[in-house]
Image (cartoon, rainbow, N blue to C red):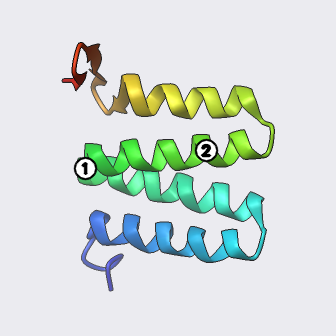
Amino acid sequence: LAESIQDNQTLGRAYETLAFVFSKLKNSKTVYELYKKSLDYFQKAGDIEQERRMCAWLGGDYFQEGKYEDAFVYFKRSLLGIKKPHGFLRISVGPIGLVE
């Protein structure tokens, strides 16, 4: 249904939920693919907070598997910038936290 009405927010959440299920089954390859699909749909929906959260989850999963370079890419994307269709959103670290 979400696909037929092109509800990117719902599709993002659906793929996120599927990723969680596969993570319990210890199928990391599928988890990464589903998180990345979720990330794509949140980007299409323009939901920056969910994009950042998915990047943090991906970074954490890669880190736990010892894939530190991959983890760094997603942690950096979560903290410093989300790729937008027309550039990057820049977030700088201020004295009391993240500032857009």
Please name the residue that numbered disc 1 is placed on.
47
- Say which element carries label 2: helix
The residue that appears at 65% across and 55% down in the rendered structure is 32
Name the one closer to the observer, 25 or 45. Answer: 25
The residue that appears at 79% across and 45% down in the rendered structure is 65
Amino acid type at image mark 1: Asp
State left or right for residue 41 relative to residue 27.
left
**x and y percentages locating residue 8 in the rendered image:** 30, 64
Please name the residue that numbered disc 2 is placed on.
60
State left or right for residue 59 relative to residue 56.
right
Quarter placement of the C terminus: top left
Name the one closer to the observer, 88 or 6. Answer: 88
Graded by Cα atoms within 10 Å as few (under 14), some (14 to 19) or many (20 or more), the crowding at tag 1 reads some
Q: How many marks?
A: 2
The residue that appears at 33% across and 86% down in the rendered structure is 1
Q: Is residue 76 above or below residue 1?
A: above
**x and y percentages locating residue 14 in the rendered image:** 43, 74
Tell me how far mark 1 sits from mark 2, CA to CA. Answer: 20 Å
The residue that appears at 69% across and 74% down in the rendered structure is 24
Q: Earlier in the sequence, mark 1 or mark 2?
A: 1
The quarter of the displayed image where residue 89 is located: top left
